[in-house]
Image (cartoon, coloured by chain):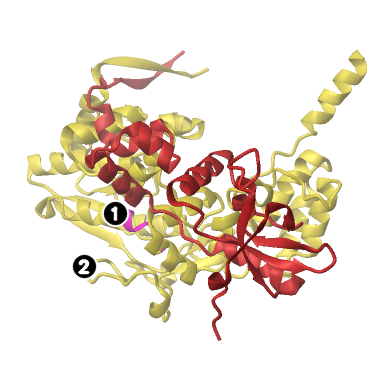
Chain colours: A red, B yellow
Amino acid sequence: MITFPCLQTKLVPREMVVANSYNPNHVPKDKMELLKQSILDNGFCFPIVTIWDEEQEKYVIIDGFHRFTICQPKWLDIPEIPIVVLDHGIQKRMTATVQFNKARGVHQVDLDAEVIRGLIEQGMSEEEISVHLGIDLDTIHRYKQLTGIAELFANAPYSKAWEVEESE
Amino acid sequence: MQKYTHKYLEETVVDAARRRVAFVFDHFETIHVSISGGKDSSVLAHLAILEAQKRGRKVGLFFLDEEAMYQSTIEMVEYWMAFAPESINRLWMQIPFSLTSATSYQDSQLLCWEPGKRKEWMRQKSENNIRQKPWAEADEKLTSGYKWLDFYGAITNYERCYKGAAFLLGERAQESPNRRYSVTKHPVTIGGQKIFWGTPRGDNFTLKPIYDWQFSDVWKYHHDNGIKHSRIYDYQFLKGYNINEVRISSLIHERSFKSLCDLPEFEPKTFEKLCKRIKGVSFVQETGKAAKLFRASKLPKNFTSWIAYRDFLLETYPLPDRRPIFEKRFSKHLSNEYVARQQCRQLICNDYENNLPIDNKPDPRQELIRYYEEQL
């Protein structure tokens, strides 16, 4: 039977939540900036997934360590954070962490480029796109360039031919 | 002693290449261009097709289909085959041969177009293509040291079907020092002229008319002539690859990890098909960029030396009948950390064919350490 823990979200003080010891996921700095921007733009849409640890008397994170980090004083300083609590043993907990980390899509490069061209057509500036999508300006310039790679060499001169010669 | 020097000519690479292609048409009846869907062979195909049209002749476009390929590559090959049908002989080969795959120990050979496994193929064959080996099974010549027909074996056997033919290749000297050497290695005499950009191949010749082109020339030629290029180059460029490192490599090969890492972003459907076809593809895709594993650049934390790690990998190597290949090879090597690290890489990549050769020399770090010990 499929359950819906997402409907049981509750707010708890940030201090009640701790990281797990095994999460192999790493989020680079620029993606943290994007996460911060996303929460500013869209609000906190996805609760942090936890289990209740009887010994520590804390909620231990299964998924959402970086959303949790964003709540810290160094970032957005959110004192009460939304969590859901699962009833998983250690084994199920570890597999759940990996499932949450890996079961997600990647963006097809050319579709990403389409989105950016669409936003530009709708009048969004490159700087705004850079901030809201977490993409540097250089990449935006590449994405804007519709015509393909050969166009870049339109004005390059052809190089001189050479031959191999024998000499004594 | 004979020395070779480079002499620059008073003409562009395009004019020189046109002249060389015309020279080939002057001296050969049968002319084939090997195409790969890549940028270099596209330039050569275009030059040869124009020359054939000018003379009312035909040029063969040869493509050895590895089955597990980018969709963009297939589309490029279709583009060239349809470019000027009246001037082209379509030599698109979809025949069984084996490819080494480093993604899985169990599927270490992919037999592409394997007979009787039609349902597992990534794509179906087209009836316009050559679907049977054009040579007799009994005459088949295998590459030395191989039990199966491999990529180069397939090419060799195909070439042996001809006599006095010119096989044109889009190789460029800029690509690697090795290939630069290949431009001068075995010159041939054709029509009384010594041709350094050609090499005898059995009863035929291979010729490389665009050997002196730079990558900028290749792209400018694409632009000036309005010819298409594979979307993979644009994807790579969008991804931030340096303009001179965009290239299309095989999807299944010891060195293919980089192309596999990007595949889901470039061609998600091809990636899904490839995952179904070959074991381990998804694993390599996820870990390929994590240098630790496949490049063997960082020792796993539960080992204290590369030698110990190598012994562990050798001991636990999953295919006992292939283990002696590695043991025999490694017994000829020096015993040091530098060599052992490379041996680990071969074991991890399942490179029993020695495609990633080992630089068998004293550990350069030892020398450095000795130097500092003396100095301090």
Sequence-first tag of 2 and 1: 1
For image coordinates 50% across by 34% down, the residue present is: B178
A100 to the left or right of B184: right
Residue B342 position (above or below residue B68): above
Direction bottom: furthest residue: A1
Is B366 covered by the magenta stretch? Answer: no
Q: Is residue B110 visible?
A: yes
Q: Chain of mark 2?
A: B
**Is B65 or B324 nearer to us in this picture?**
B65
Residue that carries the numbered disc 2 in the rendered image: B128
Marks 2, 1: nearer the viewer: 2
Q: Residue at x 81, y 46 (%)?
A: B306
| Residue B301, numbered label | none
Q: Amino acid at mark 1?
A: Phe
Which residue, given by chain and number where applicable, does mark 1 sit on? B62
In the rendered structure, the residue with mark 1 lies on which chain? B
Q: Evaluate whether label 2 is on the same chain as label 1.
A: yes
